[in-house]
Each structure stands twice: as structure tokens, then as C-alpha cells.
Amino acid sequence: MARALHQLGNTQQRLLRHLLQAHDGTSVELLCERLRISHNAVRQHLSALIGRDCVERTQSQSRGGRPQARFRLTETGRALFPRNYGLISVALLEQLQQRVGEVEVGELLQQLGKNLGASEVPPPPGASGNEVAHALAQRLDALGYEAHPARHGDEWQIEAFNCVFHALAQKFPQVCKFDLAYMESATQRRIHHLECLVRGGQMCRFRIGETMKQGSE
């Protein structure tokens, strides 16, 4: 996964900021001028950022009959810049809870998680606990949960060390219903919440249970 912007070197941060302002991309020559570094240095930084899927090479444009390569940010590159979805999320849930009530908000979050999980490809019938755990951990890790499969005796668990909704869940514990519903819908297995970061745990830990019957909630 791409790293946060502040974790990159100063020159790469400056390069990405210039690309952020260039909707249609820009050339190596312009980057050399703006960053005041050599052509070779710009090429090296671009190669590194392309390798991280933060930058892509766009279709060449002609300038005086000579083709010129241009480079622009990918969606991964844009995602490196800070975004604050939490502010509006808290405000929305506060208003929603005032209008419909705490229980109804929990039910809505649960349904949202179920719908999102249903868009995932479920494990094949007869999939082992090992296969289900690794596939689920991979999906959660891609969402930013820093999740890993873990075996405890005869059962499989998911250990997640980053709650992507941590600030939100501290104010609205019903948010955990979203996680559980998503995982159950995606795996068609019953998921048991054993430990929670928001409630003082060392991680968010989930046990993968029995296969759910068709149509069960």
C-alpha cells in the first residue's frame, strides 16, 4: 500500500505537489525547472513513484513536432494527500441519530456492511478455515486494517491492528456493526468480535465461526 505523503522524502513530496496542480500532467523538463534538480534526478524520482503506483506516464503530446512524455498522479498518488472524511461522518451520524434513534443507526450501519460484503466474491463451498481467514485478512488489509490471519488451536481468527473507523467508533460504538456485517456477508461465516481497540483491547480480534445458513442475518 502507498505510504502517507509525509513519509516520503522532501523532493518526492515537492514533485507530487507539482503534479497535483497539473491536472493534465507535466513534463520532465518542467519538473526540472520547478524542483531545480537535474534531469537524471527527476527521472529517478519518477521511476520510484511509478513503482509505488503514485505516478503514471500519460500519452505523449506533440510540441513543435517532437513527442514529449508527460507524467501525472494516479488515484493512489492523490490518496497520499490528507483527506478528512471523519469530520463529515461524525456530523452525519449525529444528525441521523437525533432523527431516527441509536438503534436505527446501528441497524442502518449493519445493512450497509452487509450490502458492501455482498459485493465481494464469497469463498467457494467447502473452503477451509485457513483459506477463509487468509482471504478475509487480505481484503481487510487492503482497506487499511493492518489485518493478519491467526490460528488459535482448531479455530482461525483475524487480528487487526488499525481500526479505520477508530475516532468514529469511539463516539458511535454501533460502527462495529458495520465491520461485523461486512465480514459475515463477505465470507458467509459467522464472525465473533472477541477484542476491540475502541474498548481498550490490544487489537480488534475476530473469530471465524460456522457457515451461515442461506438467508440468515
Image (tube, grey):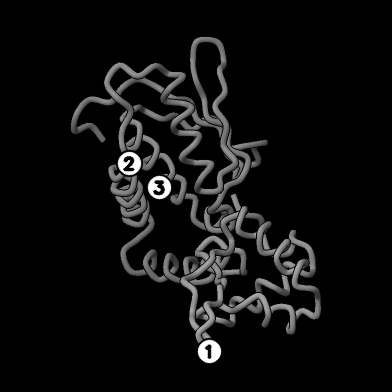
Relative height, residue 136 to residue 128 (above, below): below
Residue 120 is labelled as 2
- Furthest toward the top, the residue is 154
Q: Is residue 186 left or right of residue 173?
A: left
Between 15 and 111, which is closer to the camera in this rendering?
A: 15
The secondary structure type at the circle numbered 1 is loop
Question: The disc labelled 1 sits on which kind of residue?
Answer: Gly
The front one of 102 and 55 is 55
Query: Which numbered disc flags the more N-terminal residue, 2 or 1?
Result: 1
**Which residue is at 57% across, 69% downward?**
83
Residue topped by disc 1: 64
Query: Height in image: 159 above or below 67?
Result: above
Mark 3: secondary structure: helix
Q: Amino acid at mark 3?
A: Phe
Taking the spot 41% from the left edge, 25% from the top edge, the residue there is: 132
Q: Nearer the viewer, mark 3 or mark 1?
A: 1
Q: Which residue is outermost to the bottom?
A: 64
Circles 3 and 2, Cβ within 8 Å, touching? The answer is no
Q: Nearer the viewer, mark 3 or mark 2?
A: 2
**Disc 3 to disc 2, how far (Cα)?**
15 Å
Instruction: Determine the residue located farthest toward the left in the rendered image.
Output: 215
Which residue matches tag 3?
Answer: 178
* Mark 2 surroundings: few (<14), some (14-19) or many (≥20) residues within 10 A: some
Give 110 or 31, whichever is nearer the viewer.
Answer: 31
Q: Earlier in the sequence, mark 3 or mark 1?
A: 1
Number of numbered discs? 3
**C-alpha span from label 2 to label 1:** 49 Å
- Tell me how far mark 3 sits from mark 1, CA to CA: 56 Å
Residue 143 in view, yes or no: yes
